[in-house]
Amino acid sequence: MDAIDIMVEEHSNIERMLKVIRKMCIKVLNHEEIDYKNFYKIIDFVRNYADKHHHSKEETILFTKLSQGEGNHIGKISVEGMLVEHDLGRLFIMNLENALKKFEEGDMDSRVDIIANSIGYTDLLKRHIFKENNALYKFARKNLSDEDLKEINEKANEVEKIALDKKIQEKYLNILEELERSI
């Protein structure tokens, strides 16, 4: 399967989770009953599906190819921007986890940090996904050689096969569906 098509599909799943996160934050804001443990499921999804599975393909396969070559300043600069955003997303998730721990220890004010980091993450990722789908991926298709695209597809499909064998996609899509039903 085409690696970029796979990444676009994964973006759709990540966007579904962003909607879940936002709805959960609205419940926190409105003091509605909420299972805060579901935020840990979100963190698991983000770290292992969005980051480890999806972002690692971008970072180790696609971005590497886009950064190679003399005179490829646009590709290199674009990749640097995406990498910075990946790291910022990791920071939001780390801060979310810390806020959840404080909440569990009885710090009710940490709810504002739960909301702030969750919404910061969702806003970042919505914009990030838009840039990748509508600019970076199109740039890659237009500027990489057929040979480079073939190599990207082969490497990404290897990653996908390993993940399928470990049932990564199944596990995290099930978590996503469970959370969608719960809100």
Image (cartoon, helix red, strand yellow):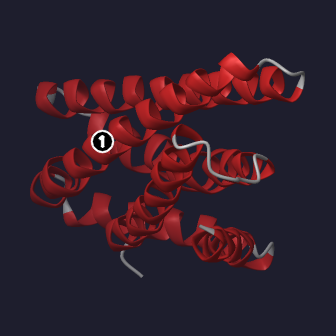
Asked which quadrant contains residue 83, the reply is: top left
- Depicted 84 relative to depicted 18: above or below: above
Question: In which quarter of the view is residue 98 placed?
Answer: top right
Q: Quadrant of residue 149?
A: bottom left
Give me the residue at 33% from left, 73% from top: 5
Q: Residue furthest right?
A: 105
The residue that disc 1 covers is 128
> Does residue 106 sit above or below 3 in this rendering?
above
Q: Which of the pair 37/27 is nearer the observer?
A: 27
Q: Position of residue 88 (x, y in %)?
A: 46, 23
Residue 120 is left or right of residue 95, and the answer is left
Q: Using residue 127 as the reference point, say whether residue 13 is left or right of it.
A: right
| Residue closest to the eye, 42 or 133 | 42
In the rendered view of the protein, which quadrant contains the N terminus? Answer: bottom left
Crowding at label 1, few (<14), some or many (≥20) Cα neighbours within 10 Å? Answer: some
In the displayed structure, 51 sits above or below 86; it is below
Could you tell me which residue is drawn at 39 percent across and 22 percent down?
Answer: 84
| Image side of residue 159 versus residue 123, left or right | right
Q: Position of residue 32 (x, y in %)?
A: 62, 50
Q: How many marks?
A: 1
Residue 75 image offset from top left, x and y in percent: 19, 34
> Given the image, on which type of amino acid does mark 1 rest?
His
Residue drawn at 38 percent across, 68 percent down: 12
Query: How far from the left and from the top, in percent, is residue 70?
Result: 18, 26
Helix, strand or loop under label 1: helix
At x 25% / y 42%, what residue is drawn?
Answer: 127
Q: Quadrant of the C terminus?
A: bottom right
139 sits to left or right of 119: left
- From the viewer's side, name the closer residue of 144 and 111: 111
Residue farthest to the front? 31
